[in-house]
Amino acid sequence: MPRPPLPPRLDAFLAKPNAAVIATVRPDGAPVTVATWYDWEDGRALVNMDASRRRNEHMRADPRVSLTVMSTPNWGSHVSLQGRVVEWIDDVDLRDIDRLAIRYFGQPYPFRDDPRVSAWIEIDLWHAWRPEDIKD
Amino acid sequence: MPRPPLPPRLDAFLAKPNAAVIATVRPDGAPVTVATWYDWEDGRALVNMDASRRRNEHMRADPRVSLTVMSTPNWGSHVSLQGRVVEWIDDVDLRDIDRLAIRYFGQPYPFRDDPRVSAWIEIDLWHAWRPEDIKD
């Protein structure tokens, strides 16, 4: 699998609000996947979650994650990123989840009561499947 | 997270040819994700891969996997399944990959030269996110 940086066309693809799934590992080593919003900036991925989610604990215990970002409607064409959380941010003013909600839905995040955290993911390896079908 | 069986409506959802991402773990414990075709039968998931893929080796070394199956077009609504590969089958006549290709594209798999293997996944835990948005 190649190392970053990604080719400009795939970098442009990742900058769009695509469907994505993130995997973390449980303390016992089993993988856990969940669909996720993400943003892409300077070759790093931003994700955001409810501070009470177990995924949050898993990522703090083992920062290694994998993110698969899918093309639409040809979701089989995808870019997968393996990396590590390198920065945690308490999203006290919900700025990051608003950023993601606006990116995906054009409006701020509607649920404002629960504390949230952001994680920035640095990419170690990437892989593209049928990248010729990915529109940039 | 609940244990199987899944409610009939989610079982019916999984039976449809949805977008999916599977996570396996590398020998060093890092998660690896990739978009995948799957089929769903009697509460188990079928996946199929090129016999030479590293994912295949990973799954044989550690059979624990996680599968996230997404709704369309509301991909944020999803069902995630945590389980283990309980059966490996050499797909010598390409019957299983044809089954998946026909399920997703209505025709047999076009690449017939490389050996392929199938894995049946038994589900230990499942989780649904916004299941009310999932159409069965």
Image (cartoon, coloured by chain):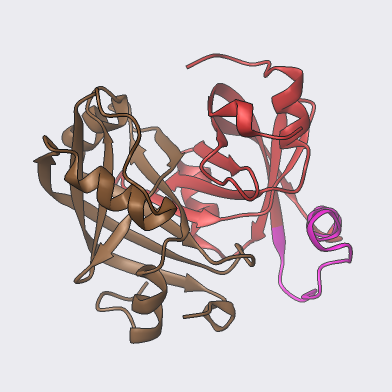
Chain colours: A red, B brown
Q: Is residue A13 above or below residue B53?
A: below
Measured as percent of width and height from the top left, residue A50 is found at 64, 64
Q: Nearer the viewer, residue B39 or A45?
A: B39
Q: Is residue B49 above or below residue A47?
A: above
For the point 46% across and 60% down, which residue is it? Answer: B18
Q: In this view, does A12 lie above or below A67?
A: above
For the point 44% across and 39% down, which residue is it? Answer: B33
Q: In this view, does B73 lie to the left or right of B97?
A: right
Q: Is residue B59 left or right of residue B110?
A: left
Q: Is residue A8 above or below residue B68?
A: above
Specify whether residue A57 is painted magenta. no
Location of residue A44 (image quadrant): top right
Measured as percent of width and height from the top left, residue B40 is found at 28, 64
For the point 11% across and 34% down, which residue is it? Answer: B92
Measured as percent of width and height from the top left, residue B19 is found at 49, 55
Q: Which of A98 and B112 is in front in this view?
A: B112
Q: Which of A112 and A20 is in front in this view?
A: A20
Specify whether residue A103 is painted magenta. yes
Q: Is residue A103 left or right of residue B16?
A: right
Measured as percent of width and height from the top left, residue B66 is found at 35, 52
Q: Nearer the viewer, residue A24 or A3?
A: A3
Residue stretch rendered in magenta on the structure = A95-116
**Number of numbered discs visible in the structure rendering:** 0
Location of residue B72 (image quadrant): bottom right
